[in-house]
Image (cartoon, rainbow, N blue to C red):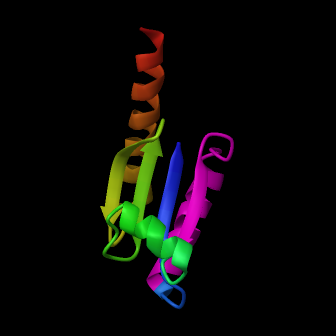
């Protein structure tokens, strides 16, 4: 699973979102299961990446599983408990699809 946090330099809300995602991944013991990327939309590369994913609001969080977008949050995410439950469902659904 890959989680992308899109933000802008100097945006406190973006910084907090990045820190929240880092803390959650560490707290849940998912460092080996989840890649976390921060994309700064004030850079040329960040703007190109943001344009590709139609990011118009910060912070935006995009969750990908096997190269497909499976969740997207514009402006923030739900509370940590709900986020964990949703991401676990995504991981479990993907694992179960591999069994068939």
Tell me the residue at 43%/18% (across/down). Answer: 96
Magenta highlight on residue 31: yes
Q: Is residue 88 above or below residue 59?
A: above
Instruction: Out of 8 and 13, give the one closest to the viewer.
Output: 8
Residue 75, image x, y percentages:
33, 72
Tell me the residue at 48%/87% (across/down). Answer: 11
Instruction: Out of 96 and 83, give the one closest to the viewer.
Output: 96
Residue 60, image x, y percentages:
39, 68
Instruction: Out of 51 and 75, give the one closest to the viewer.
Output: 51
Q: Residue furthest bottom?
A: 10
Tell me the residue at 59%/46% (across/down). Answer: 34
* Among the 4 quarters of the image, the one containing residue 13: bottom left
Quadrant of the image containing the C terminus: top left
Q: Is residue 42 visible?
A: yes
Tell me the residue at 34%/69% (across/down). Answer: 55
Q: Is residue 84 visible?
A: no
53 to the left or right of 91? left
Magenta highlight on residue 32: yes
Q: Residue furthest right?
A: 32
Residue 31, image x, y percentages:
67, 47
Residue 28, image x, y percentages:
59, 47
Magenta region: 13-39
Q: Is residue 72 above or below residue 39?
A: above
């Amino acid at each position: 699973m890959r989680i992308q946090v899109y933000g802008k330099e100097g945006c406190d809300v973006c910084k907090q979102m990045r820190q929240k995602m880092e803390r959650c991944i560490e707290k849940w013991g998912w460092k080996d299961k989840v890649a976390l990327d921060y994309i700064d939309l004030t850079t040329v590369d960040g703007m190109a990446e943001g344009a590709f994913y139609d990011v118009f609001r910060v912070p935006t969080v995009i969750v990908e599983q096997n190269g497909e977008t499976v969740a997207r949050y514009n402006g923030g995410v739900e509370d940590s408990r709900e986020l964990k439950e949703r991401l676990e469902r995504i991981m479990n659904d993907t694992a179960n699809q591999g069994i068939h």
